[in-house]
């Protein structure tokens, strides 16, 4: 068991709970506020082979955004998977998309799982125990965030099955092939969310105008 796994094996450390107390999360100097509409978090370690798939997907999204910009108020952010930092990043965010590697006992390398827990529900998906390299998993982090009232408005998790997590750089071929299609899929998630949010704002504005018109005698 590595240091990170030992750190979380017996529950949430006091340091994690203390870091959950900050109002806006920071990672590499980036502070996120309620103005962020969509956040894509790439979890992983680029020096652990396929565990670096999260950052690789972010890099692909940034490359795609040069030709086709993402909707306004969309943030792409790397994270090491620390629960306090994750909660700080996605708090007050309408949509959080998380990309991480998973390493089940019999992996189908490059296979992508999509998980969308219902807002406000305590998640318990059948496939959560997928042996992530991060000792305190996403499921436990989301449960902690839910208990603190600090979950995102909507969460989408993509878990990519990996083959190698030994020391070294570079993804294995099957995981590399998954990066491009996954980045495109996440781009579509973000665009659909932005379009739905714009529609909601227009509907709310129309209701406000109708109410004001009806109050005039």
Image (cartoon, rainbow, N blue to C red):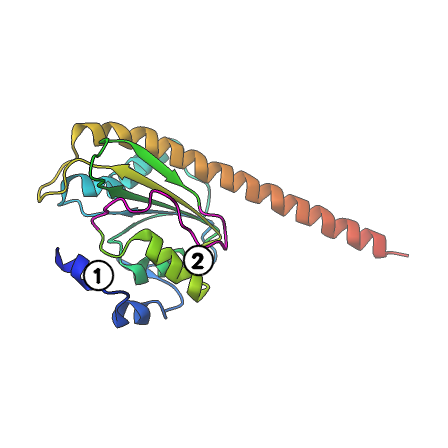
Q: CA distance from mark 2 to mark 1?
A: 23 Å
User: Is residue 146 visible from the viewing direction of this image?
Assistant: yes
Picture coordinates of residue 22, whole percent (x, y) = 36, 69
Residue at x 45% of width, y 53% of height: 36
- Location of residue 82 in the rendering, given as x and y in whole percent from the top left corner: 26, 58
* Residue 131 is one of the magenta-drawn residues: yes
Asked which secondary structure carries label 2, the reply is loop
Based on the picture, tell me whether residue 159 belongs to the magenta stretch: no
Instruction: Classify the position of the N terminus by image quarter.
Output: bottom left
Residue at horizontal 20 percent and vertical 49 percent from the top: 133
Disc 2 to disc 1: CB gap under 8 Å: no
Mark seen at residue 9 = 1
In the image, residue 18 sits, relative to residue 184, either above or below, namely below
Q: Which residues are magenta?
A: 117-133
Furthest residue in direction right, as rendered: 217
For residue 4, which quarter of the picture?
A: bottom left
Callout count: 2
| Residue 66 shows in the view | no
45 vs 125, left or right, is left
Task: Give the numbered dot on residue 151.
Answer: 2
Q: Residue at x 14, y 44 (%)?
A: 48
Q: Name the N-terminal-most of marks 2 and 1.
A: 1
Whether 201 is drawn above or below 109: the answer is: below
Picture quarter containing residue 89?
A: bottom left
Q: Nearer the viewer, residue 61 or 91?
A: 91
């Amino acid at each position: 068991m590595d240091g990170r796994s030992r750190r979380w094996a017996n529950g949430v450390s006091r340091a994690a709970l203390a870091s959950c107390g900050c109002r806006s999360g920071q990672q590499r100097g980036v502070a996120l506020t309620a103005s962020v509409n969509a956040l894509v978090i790439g979890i992983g370690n680029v020096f652990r082979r396929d565990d670096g798939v999260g950052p690789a997907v972010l890099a692909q999204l940034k490359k795609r955004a040069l030709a086709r910009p993402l909707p306004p108020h969309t943030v792409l952010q790397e994270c090491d998977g620390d629960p306090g930092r994750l909660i700080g990043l996605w708090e007050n965010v309408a949509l959080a998309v998380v990309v991480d590697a998973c390493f089940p006992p019999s992996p189908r390398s490059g296979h992508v799982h999509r998980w969308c827990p219902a807002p406000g529900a305590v998640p318990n998906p059948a496939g959560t125990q997928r042996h992530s390299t991060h000792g305190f998993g996403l499921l436990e982090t989301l449960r902690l965030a839910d208990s603190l009232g600090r979950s995102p408005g909507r969460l989408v998790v993509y878990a990519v099955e990996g083959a190698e997590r030994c020391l070294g750089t570079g993804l294995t071929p099957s995981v590399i092939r998954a990066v491009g299609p996954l980045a495109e899929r996440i781009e579509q998630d973000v665009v659909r969310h932005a379009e739905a949010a714009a529609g909601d704002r227009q509907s709310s504005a129309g209701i406000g105008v109708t109410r004001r018109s009806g109050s005039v005698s």
